[in-house]
Amino acid sequence: MRKWFVLVILVIVVGGAAAYYLEIGVSAQTKRERYITKARNYSSNNKINEAVIEYKNALKVDPAHAESHYELALLLVKKGDVKNAYREMVRATDLDPKLIKARYQLAVMNLLARDLRRASQDLAKLQQQDKDAYETHYLAGQIATLEKQPDKAIEELRAAQRKEPIKGRTLVDIGRVQVSKRDFKAAEESFRDAIAIDGKLATARIALAQLLFVTGSPDKAEEELLAATKADPENEDLLHVLGSFYSRTRQSDDFEKLYQDLLKRKPDSLIARKRLTELALARNDLKKAKDLNEQILKAAPDDIDGKYFRARIYLSEREAQKAADDLAVVTRLAPRFAAGFYYLGQAQLRLGKAADATRSYTKASELLPHWQLPHLGLAQLHLAEGNVDLALDEVGKILATQPKNYAALMISGAARLKKGEADKALEIFKEVARANPKNIAARFNLASAYVAKKQYQDALNQYEEVLKLAPDMIEALGAIAQLHMAQGNTKAAFARVEQARNGSKNLAGINQLLGQISFATRDYGKAIDYLEKALSHNPELTSAYYTIGNAYAAEKRFDAALEQYRKIVSKNPKSIPAFMMIGTIYDRQKQTAKANEAYQKVLAIDQNFAPAANNLAWNYAEHGGNIDVALTLAQKAREARADDPSVADTLGWVYYKKGIYETAIRLLKESSDKFENRNPTVLYHLGMAYYKRDDVALARQTLKKVVALNQTLAEVESAKKALAELGEKR
């Protein structure tokens, strides 16, 4: 037995040695080709990481093989590792200067990075090798497009098309240049010619659909997308493009059925789940979107689309920071993905990062020039910052192809109103209202234009029309009350708001208005009663707490009020309104530590309660607390109460304290506009932000408004002091 055992061992050892000897005898070229074959097999099965490893093994054996560097670079691009992909592509061209496809891809990467100088250098080298090659003409066309030379671009692209007439994508690029020239008829012909060459070319149908939509043929656009989807339902190019049409298409059920059927045939299909997720988001079905996307990320944890969808869901759930974190990854790995940048801009805006949001919206608009949402976002940002002409420029880009785009017209009208062009604004709002008599925003803005022209009865009539369409729109009711009070008719204001109480679904808003009118007429007891009723219906009315605090201050009844609210919390230790009022009253008494303690108790009950987060942030910023904690709290409040001017003021003031004056000014201006430039505290903050930015004229103008309001506030004295200092600056 022992002899046999020894014999077996010897056979194994000798066999292993022979195998080792044979491997040693294999040439480097053969080893390299084995690794490359494995890599290509992995790549064809979409196993990118495994393929990358095999290419790296091939390059260990033969570091000078240009083709391996080239193919590895292409895979790294797929992984989103652009930096290393670029390095590998450079290595490929260095090793084999005649490898045209590598030189061409390197030029494309330079173009994507907007490095026209290097792309042009690559083009010159390609022209030296073969000036009439398809790649040479195509690259020249792309460079001319970026250099805004459309005629030259078309000439070069047509030359490329003649070299390889079966390539429909070249016709798509020609069509896109023709769109930039506003030659829509020629563009449509180019897109249709591309489809005739390749009926499954999704990019051609997408481009045609987008053109048809922006030129006023949404039904035809929908037909093209449906045809593209049916022809190739798993085409990645259709992802996200379809999403922008889902919300307005009448055939969304057809799209849904198509992908549900695909999922039945291919239960592991990620693309089917992605399309269904996109459709669910367009329908605002968050639960369904969340369930589907969890399945996507479970199957592929690093999937870019999965992270993008998750960010969209976070935005809907008011988790702006989480959304921003995901979208930062998405835009880094997919730098040509316009939607990623657009929604990143939305997240940044909710976090109070206006400058970052502007950059993100701008990038999205550059990547997809005819997508209206980034232009609308930029226009609204410019309008909020007082850059009226820039806002008009952005909406002008939309109105050039969609003259009846109501969202763009509304911003245009608002911009005209800010410029003091009330007549033009009035005509724009009338146009929108005539085209869509049930457009609430158009009628509301029409009333605002009448107010600007001092046509108060016409304004009242329009506000009443708004209330017929939206009986619970508290902004319209408040505007009516304000108009009556401005004309000295407080009784009419009170009566109209009381009248609205019957059958109203917004009793919180009604009682708040009645409380504000009572406070304005110095009936403080009644004001407190109304405002407490308002808070019983909606505890998150931030300004109601301030007004109640002011009413108690006017009556000097702090101790009695505190005793009352302490009784409430002794019976109900989780009474948020009672703790909020305790904090507010301590704030009025300048007992900041006790106020903060009350707000912290509120946040212990509900960590997302915006008024407590807002007030605590203010106290930290104003009274020597941790400014970074203040910023986090103020951002949390802003996410929950994006339209609250008090919250915008707090966040703006925190940014002021941190020395970030541009962002501070945008938020403070937004707040002041919503307070109709009549809140002295906000005006003082805005004036000081202008002062710190060395904008002497605007600082002086704004601080003078504080003094003119003639209120006995500390801000008035501070404004006078600042004006005296400004007087020395000429």
Image (cartoon, rainbow, N blue to C red):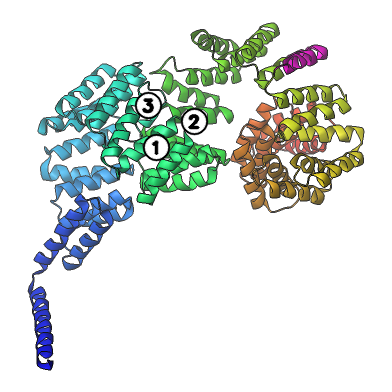
Is 2 above or below relative to 112?
below
Label 3 environment density (alpha carbons within 10 Å; few <14, some 14–19, many ≥20): many
Residue that mark 1 sits on: 277
| Amino acid at the residue labelled 2 | Leu
How would you classify the magenta stretch by its main secondary structure? helix
**First-in-chain label (3 vs 2):** 3
Discs 3/1, front: 1
Q: Are marks 3 and 2 in contact (CB under 8 Å)?
A: no
The residue closer to the viewer here, 447 or 41, is 41
User: In x, y percent, where is residue 121?
Assistant: 23, 45
Give SS at disc 1.
helix
Q: Secondary structure at mark 3?
A: helix
Residue 565 shows in this picture: yes
Labels 1, 2: front one: 1
- 534 drawn magenta: no
Question: Which picture quadrant has residue 576?
Answer: top right
Disc on the earlier residue, 1 or 2: 1
For badge 1, the amino acid type reads: Thr
Tag 3 residue: 245
Which residue extends farthest front? 1
Name the residue beneath numbered marker 2.
378
Instruction: State the CA–CA distance, disc 1 to disc 2.
Output: 27 Å
Q: Quadrant of the N terminus?
A: bottom left
